[in-house]
Amino acid sequence: MDKYQEQATKTEAEVFSEKSDKPNLAFVDGQNMHFGTTKCYKCAARLKISIKEIKLADCNCGNAWEVNLAKLRVYLKENYNVSEAYYLLGNLKDNNADMYNEIQKAGFILVFKEHHNKSKSKKKGNVDADLVFEVMKNLIDNQNFNQVVLISGDGDYKKLVSYLITKKRFKKILFPNKQFASSLYNELGGEAFDCLENLKTYIA
Ligand SMILES: [Zn+2]
């Protein structure tokens, strides 16, 4: 893409956004956000425990932190005009009623992953298919939104992001942890992504 094309595409997308007075929707990959913020790989290695086992309090180097969900919801509203924010939960075993309440109180719409107990899939707990489904369902059934904000660093969404960009329905992808964001997103322009780490002042 040369400079002229880039400018033309950008203008077209901008015109689309300006034309639409409709709000945006956000989709949070809960598991990816949880791992990307609260789990410290450095301290897990230091303590010789697995990344699954390590808790927020085990990190003494300052890398791990916790997103304040209520603040995140306000940030999404104020900065990205997000009217509805969907929070997709991963592995049910790791979740509990307190957690559901906290997510809902913060103003997110909880979406549970469909579980197949007999499934031997190693990807159990990932929400990629469910999140993609929710986005596509809204694209088809919901006439009342403009663009999509995605919170995840998982490369599984690259196809979805590329599709949304071509349809002018993509607003932003927020990486929970830039270090672990999939390199598949490297080709995105700077205006297409941000990192939750950069927003700590507002959402921690
Ligand atoms: Zn640490």
Image (tube, grey):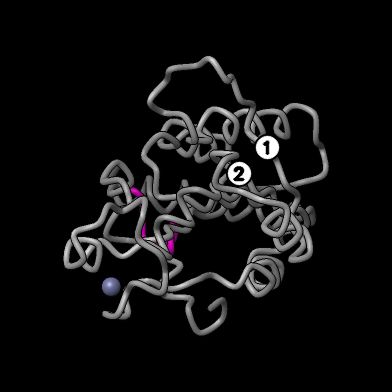
Which one is nearer the viewer's eye here, 116 or 21? 116
Residue 196 position, x and y percent, is 46, 67
Residue at x-position 34% and y-position 72%: 58
Q: Is residue 66 above or below residue 134?
A: below
**Numbered badge on residue 198:** none
Which one is nearer the viewer's eye here, 185 or 120? 120
Indicate the quadrant of ligand 1 in the picture: bottom left
Q: How many marks?
A: 2
SS at mark 1 in the image: strand
Mark 2 and 1 residues: CB-CB less than 8 Å, in contact? yes
In the image, what residue type sits under mark 1? Phe
Residue at x-position 50% and y-position 16%: 119
Residue 102 position, x and y percent, is 71, 63
Residue 12 visible at all: no
Residue at x-position 82% and y-position 37%: 143
- Tag 2: Cα neighbours inside 10 Å, few (<14), some, or many (≥20)? many
- Tag 1: Cα neighbours inside 10 Å, few (<14), some, or many (≥20)? some
Left or right? Give the position of 51 relative to 71: left
Q: Is residue 63 above or below residue 98?
A: below
**Numbered badge on residue 89:** 2
Left or right? Give the position of 170 relative to 197: right
Region of the chain picked out in magenta, as a range: 188-194
Q: Is residue 193 magenta?
A: yes
Left or right? Give the position of 111 relative to 22: left
In the image, what residue type sits under mark 2? Leu
Q: Which residue is mark 1?
A: 112
Q: Is residue 191 above or below residue 181?
A: below
Residue at x-position 69% and y-position 71%: 70
Which one is nearer the viewer's eye here, 9 or 22? 22
